[in-house]
Image (cartoon, grey):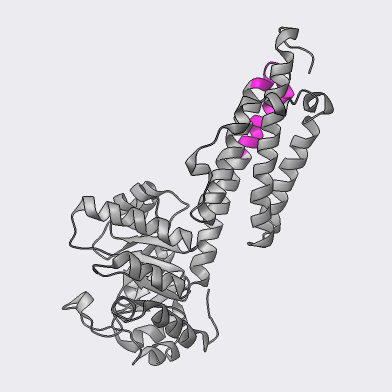
Amino acid sequence: MSNLHSDSIQPAIWRILDANFDRAREGLRIIEEWCRFALNDRTMANECKQMRQDLGMWHTPEIRSARDTTRDVGTALTHPREEQRTGIEQLLQANLCRVQEALRVLEEYGKLSSVALSSNCKQMRYRVYALESNLLTYRRRQSLASARLYLVTAAAPDLLARVEAALQGGLTLVQYRDKDSNDVDRLATAQAMCQLCHKYGALFIINDRVDLALAVDADGVHLGQQDVSIEIARQILGSQKIVGKSTTNPAEMDRAIAEGADYIGVGPVYETPTKAGKAAAGLEYVQHAAKHATVPWFAIGGIDSTNIDDVVQAGAPGLAMVRAIMNAENPTHAVQYCLAMLNRVPQMRV
């Protein structure tokens, strides 16, 4: 670390390096703990640990000695967005960004003193980008695979309150479906519902509208048979997001899976006003999906407390519901009841 252009700037450079070594290592540790204790993923936890150790080798006593916390004007600087996290995804994203920014600073200021340091930090930054993609994709896929109950919303004057009550019952997957509101209102509701779902650690999906899913950073989109293709949805949203597809028969199921759907809806099992004029697919299609589906799937259509047991016994590992939860006197209790019924049968996921 001895090739600085001027000895007078050396302490400042060291202070910058010291602060950003700390930022990068602290951010990596936060991510590592989630990979280790929540995801139980040895590979990603080890990647974080290796990067922390590599940075530690460059964080020499000489650099540490330049630290001057008492005179650091930045210690009192903060921002309201740093004081609270709405959910685990925001927490992870914030710390991934923190690490990436710190590595960029180390890369640039490292050019003044060590080409090797700069080069290493550049390569590490790309490793963090890859980790970010793998981590967020992994979390969404894991949450999707473990979800057994899927709320599809319907219009209600107290929509957000009802969704929150359902989340309090243990719901982990919500789809915002709104065919009637204008786009200004849809966007505002989608933003609020996305934040609400992430607060409770639930996935948030938007029905049909890929543009709205992108605008509010939803976890994914659910497509109907007449919507844009799965391929186009992925081009717009990126590979990290979830794309689901409605299917009404075995041919549509096979096609959706071949096109890369992350999950499928199977139904309508019974006739429902939500799909007015569409004939029921019946329990036969549920039984077919139970034998042949190779992605997570949810039976949907007219399912309520009177027939839930029949659908589960037909082999459905998960259920998507609208009225049974949205119109319930107590959505929290409705969710808890449905989950209890589902949990009587061992989960059979691909």
205 shown above or below 154 = above
Relative depth, front residue between 129 and 341: 341
Q: Which region of the structure is painted magenta?
A: 109-126
- Residue displayed at 21% across by 75% down: 275
Relative placement, left or right, of 32 versus 148 is right
Give x and y (percent) for residue 248: 29, 76
Relative placement, left or right, of 279 versus 285 is left
Give x and y (percent) for residue 35: 65, 56
Relative placement, left or right, of 136 versus 167 is right
- Residue displayed at 26% across by 59% down: 227
Give x and y (percent) for residue 273: 20, 79
Relative depth, front residue between 98 and 35: 98
Residue 120 appears anywhere in the view: no
Quarter of the view holding residue 56? top right
Q: Quadrant of the N terminus?
A: top right
- Residue displayed at 44% across by 91% down: 313
- Tell me how many marks there are: 0
141 shown above or below 58 = below
Quarter of the view holding residue 37? bottom right
Residue 152 is covered by the magenta coloring: no
Quarter of the view holding residue 34? bottom right
Principal SS element in the magenta part?
Answer: helix
